[in-house]
Amino acid sequence: MRALKSLFNVFIIISVIVCAVPSINCSAESDKPAAAADVSVLSKYVWRGFELSNDSLVVQPSLTVSYKGVGINLGRNLDTEFDDRDPATSDESSLNETDLTVSYDRTFGSFSLGAGYIYYALDGLSDSQEVYASLGLDTLLAPTVKIYREIAHTPAWYVSLGISHS
């Protein structure tokens, strides 16, 4: 995973440059490969219900390549004032997570189905792995439900229900 993290550091520079442009897509046709770069700037980082940041700015760049429904995403988490909850250590900037997601998504009329695998490389913690399945509906508020299953350490299920409009 160390090589993956080093490779991603190179991609961080590329993603910052690419994200300066509002939207980049390698092709308008769905049968050709597409690539996207995103950067989220957040006030907190919450993972599986646990707040992993404390009064800091969190930056999450990611790169995605997809082709015919198959996608690969590489993402990173930068906490500008990482709080490890240990009073004996100072809070500092930390690239503390690298995620690799492999997914397959398909649309059937108004329905979308998806499945995937996520590998979380967590600095200072045991790495985590999970699989997921999703079901969405292309209608008002675009409801989507995702069901996740942790498979690496303590097997556990969790469900996410999302709504959005664009």
Image: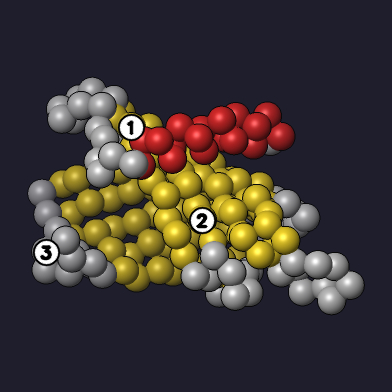
Q: Mark 2 to mark 1: distance in Å? A: 20 Å
In three-dimensional space, the C-alpha distance between marks 1 and 3, rounded to whole angstroms, equals 26 Å
| Residue position for label 1 | 35
Asked whether disc 2 touches disc 1, contact meaning CB atoms under 8 Å apart, the reply is: no
Image quadrant where residue 126 sits: bottom right
Q: Is residue 62 above or below residue 2?
A: below
Q: Which residue in the structure is indicated by mark 2? A: 59
> Residue 165: x, y in percent?
18, 65
Q: Nearer the viewer, mark 2 or mark 3?
A: 2
How many labels were placed on the picture?
3
Location of residue 151 by image quarter: bottom right
Q: Position of residue 144 (x, y in %)?
A: 28, 64
Badge 2 crowding class, 10 Å Cα cut-off, few under 14, some 14 to 19, many 20 or more, is some
As shown in the figure, which amino acid type bears the numbered disc 1?
Answer: Ala
Q: Position of residue 73 (x, y in %)?
A: 45, 40
Secondary element type, mark 2: strand
Q: Position of residue 104 (x, y in %)?
A: 35, 40
Residue at mark 3: 139
In this rendering, which labeled residue sits more in front, label 2 or label 1? 2
The disc, 1 or 3, on the residue closer to the chain's N-terminal end is 1
Residue 131 sits above or below residue 70 on the image: below
The numbered mark, 2 or 3, whose residue comes first in the sequence reads: 2
